[in-house]
Image: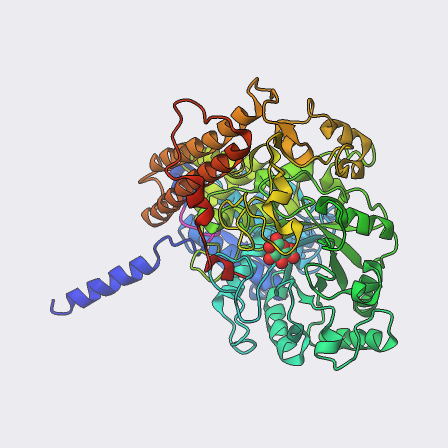
Amino acid sequence: MKNALPILFLIVCIGSSRAEDGYRLWLRYDKIGNSRLLQQYRNSISSIRVDTPGAVLVAAREELLNGLQGLLGMSLPGMQGRALSGTGEGSAIREGCVLAGTSASSPAIRSLHLEQELARAGQEGFIILSVTREGRHAIAIAANTEAGVLYGVFHFLRLLQTGRDIRQLSIHEVPALHYRMLDHWDNLNRIVERGYAGLSIFNWHTLPLYIDKRYRDYARANASIGINGAVINNVNANALVLTKEYLLKAAALANLFRTYGIRVYLSVKFSAPIEIGGLKTADPLDPGVQAWWQQKANEIYTYIPDFGGFLVKASSEGQPGPQNYGRSHADGANLLADALAPHGGIVVWRAFVYSNEVPEDRAKQAYNEFKPLDGKFRSNVLVQVKNGPIDFQPREPFHPLFGALPGTPLMMEFQLTQEYLGFATHLVYLAPLFKECLDADTWRKGKGTPVSSTISGMAAVANIGNERNWCGHPFAQANWYALGRLAWDPGLSSAQIADEWIRQTFTNEGAIVDTVKKMMLASREITVDYMTPLGLHHIMGYNHHYGPAPWFNQASRPDWNCTYYHKADSTGIGFDRSSTGSNALEQYAPEVRKEFESVRDCPDRWLLWFHHVPWDHRMQSGRTLWNELCYKYYAGVDSVRWMQKAWNSCKGKIDAERWDQVRMLLAIQEREAVWWRNACLLYFQSFSGMPLPAGSERPDHDLGHYEALRFPIAAENK
Ligand code: BDP
């Protein structure tokens, strides 16, 4: 008895270290609580079999075994072909076996004759089928490649985690997009540009010898949602990443990620030949520069044989690029593409360009720059376009480049990290933002040419850091999840993805799933309402982008000022991008242009993006513009309070640790929503001269107070 206390203490400690801190993401694999389902699953599954596995199949087998054992709450024989030799089973199928493999790796899969089905699965797709042979029932997870099997395994585990019936499975999945990537804006010193979840998970200091457990869990999470590429360093790149020392570190990550079907990419600095190569120029047409990049590419592939390629931010926001030498973006991209082509690598060249010297509407500049270059890029170049023409705002119309470059493959760039959406303290589920863009009709090939049909890949700026729960806000994980799922299948709905995520991350209890789903689905519109309603944009604090600063007009260049974007004056508010203004609308197909061109017909949510509108303009609701603006800002705050109530109603149904975290974060969100509303309305009121709605909650400070707020530390977050 003397030792009982320390032992009890130890048990408590072990218990609490397993508390729900969010580390496990959506891959929790806790025992299924619903006894009817548990019984069904136990009846259907009694062993697994993964024959002659290569490295990816080893990872798949481990996941399948761990996942099933956790979910079913029992241990399973995790057999493989070799272990069976001598038992006489060969290709025979056992009752209740989950078989996973390719035809090449597995005699059991071969014996099922799935050739026809697999012909449609391509390189990364999979099938999951309930099969019966000689009276024995089994489940086959089959694909043409090991990566396909891995995706199938994760899909199968998702079915169980989300409580689906698995008795008659007939699933055929093929990813819609070839490139499904995360872009990490992680610096080599581990500071994450625009990161709000701690330091970079990539510890360059201890690589390559120290392989953090997180690297594997990161890779598992990505593979579980089909992400197959990771750019592991910041687009504002440090040339050092291309030195041997750092390439060996990247190779260590690549060796691990490969076993989860993920390729490593690097962001490169265009001036690297000067900075680390000792050359005098980085001119893309200089033979010495071309030779340097070729030699560098050859070197990279000796360390990383399946290296994905380069991501490049060039001639953009002060980064060096081909324009330093009077060359075009195509010249720059092709230089790197030629170096990578012999090895099968690609160049992802960013279209995020806008110049101080060009007195043109910033929203028009990328199109003007890239449209004439269509067809001039090498075939292994993809041009990466942000979802909207400005910069990851809470709401933007789709970028006019989508569908406008028929001769150039495009890559979508979304942002998961909430640089302009309240950092990692606001609950904002981004699938509706992604869908709004992906589903938008570009009309480039007639009606029914959605943005999703104009892209070959999808990337997103990651929101991952070394905080215990990876993303800072427990709900920010859902955005990582949604990105992967939509890159795999842009046809999925925001609700479907939220449903899956909630069930895997929190609970399968119907009433809670419904409540949380409602919160998630409403959250993006709520944020737009309290930050940038009716098409307003880029009115955040200068540089750090924290909080409202619509008054800001002190930047060194006009297009870094908030006043540039809202153009409020005594007559009205908004940026005229119609034919009477910058005519940015001319960059869209005529049908799209028509939709937005007149103040009368333009949907409210884009109104101030495309038009400068008088304060007393009658909106579709019947309210004046000023009153509508007030209505939106007030509704935004009210809706955050509604989210707080909804979350409170989940108390006790969600583990205490994460429930309380979200409760506290919602309190921050509420306070900041009020701040946004008050600051913006007081400022815009100084132009409209109109009163706040009668009876509404009054701002607790005057405009001067809000204008005087400073956030010197937030500004360091780069
Ligand atoms: C802006 C960010 C900046 C990035 C830039 C980019 O504020 O930190 O470097 O985008 O995408 O939104 O290159």
Rendering quarter of residue 8: bottom left
Q: Nearer the viewer, residue 46 or 10?
A: 10
Q: Nearer the viewer, residue 357 or 443?
A: 357
The quadrant of the rendered image in which ligand 1 is seen is bottom right
- Please identify the quadrant where the N terminus is shown: bottom left
User: Residue 174 appears at what percent x and percent y?
Assistant: 69, 46
Query: In terms of secondary structure, what is the magenta stretch mainly?
Result: loop
Compared to residue 618, the image places residue 236 above or below, namely below
Compared to residue 303, the image places residue 449 above or below, namely above
Identify the magenta region: 25-31
Give yes or no for residue 261 being in the magenta stretch: no
| Residue drawn at (67%, 37%) of the image | 575
User: Residue 591 appears at what percent x and percent y?
Assistant: 79, 29
- Please identify the quadrant where the C terminus is shown: bottom right
User: Residue 327 appears at what percent x and percent y?
Assistant: 84, 63
Res 221 visible = yes
User: Residue 576 appears at what percent x and percent y?
Assistant: 70, 35
Compared to residue 544, the image places residue 587 above or below, namely above
Q: Nearer the viewer, residue 136 or 463?
A: 463
How many marks the image carries: the answer is 0
Q: Nearer the viewer, residue 179 or 320?
A: 320
| Residue drawn at (57%, 41%) of the image | 394
Q: Is residue 277 left or right of residue 53?
A: right
Q: Is residue 555 left or right of residue 43?
A: right
| Residue drawn at (67%, 38%) of the image | 397
| Residue drawn at (85%, 53%) of the image | 373
